[in-house]
Image (spheres, rainbow, N blue to C red):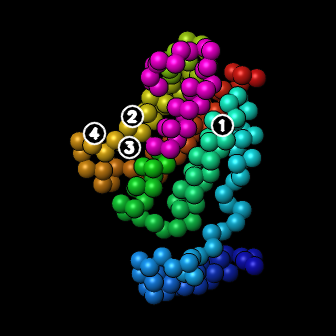
Amino acid sequence: MITNDDELKDAVSIVDEHIQEIQNYLGQDPRADGKIRFPRNFIRTAGHFRNQLSFVKDKNIRDNLAYALIQSDVYRWLTNRTDIFGTAKEMVIKSGIALMGSICETMAIDGTKGIIGKKHSFCERCNRMILKDIISEYLKNELHWLWEARAAIHIYEINHREHEKYKMKDYNRAIKATRELRNAFENYHS
């Protein structure tokens, strides 16, 4: 059990050394006996996320949003508990931003059922959510930014190198916009 910062440093050093030894020995071999146990109690449960999505009426959509939020916890663990760096870190951040965009899109469509028609694009839906007093102008702008950032999932449409493009501050901005949209729908539907 770790009880202080010195013990933490020692434990990290031991884990670092052993993980590297496992990697050196196995290389790209995906052997089952070389798998490292993922730490328990970091990834939150689907039930935890479902409870935060009470405004989502469709059970399948609520479940799938909960699973997507579990995926975001995996990205959070990678960025918080490892020193992943360079292009690999940027691609985790890009994936996290894209995931937040998809979560927001789903919440926006489900949260405006019967209020805003189905045919509207995400950004147009956000514009209309302002008129319905669901979200603020600030949140609309953040969601428009998120949607533009999410568009990078279409690699063939990117007309620049993605190297050194994705930063943690952008990922945190995407997470904040997602939380604010969820809170806006909770308030609107309560």
Identify which amino acid the numbered label 2 is placed on.
Answer: Glu
Give coordinates of residue 56: x percent, y percent.
Answer: 68, 30
As drawn, the label of residue 60 is 1
- Say whether residue 24 is visible: yes
Q: What residue sits right under mark 2 in the picture?
A: 148
In this view, the mark in front (2 or 1)? 1
The magenta-colored residue range is: 98-124
The N terminus sits in image quarter: bottom right
Identify which amino acid the numbered label 1 is placed on.
Answer: Asn
> Helix or strand or loop: what does disc 3 sit on?
helix
Q: Real-space Cα distance between discs 4 and 3?
A: 9 Å
Q: Sort mark 3 into few (<14), some (14-19) or many (20+) by Cα contacts within 10 Å.
A: some
Q: Real-space Cα distance between discs 1 and 3?
A: 24 Å
Taking the spot 57% from the left edge, 82% from the top edge, the residue there is: 33
Q: What residue sits right under mark 4 in the picture?
A: 157
Q: Residue furthest top?
A: 131
> Helix or strand or loop: what does disc 4 sit on?
helix
Q: Real-space Cα distance between discs 4 and 2?
A: 12 Å
Residue 140: say if magenta.
no
Taking the spot 38% from the left edge, 43% from the top edge, the residue there is: 153
Q: CB atoms at circles 2 and 3 under 8 Å apart?
A: no
Name the dominant secondary structure of the magenta segment: helix
Q: What residue sits right under mark 3 in the picture?
A: 153
Give coordinates of residue 190: x percent, y percent.
Answer: 76, 23
Identify which amino acid the numbered label 4 is placed on.
Answer: Glu
In this view, the mark in front (2 or 3)? 3
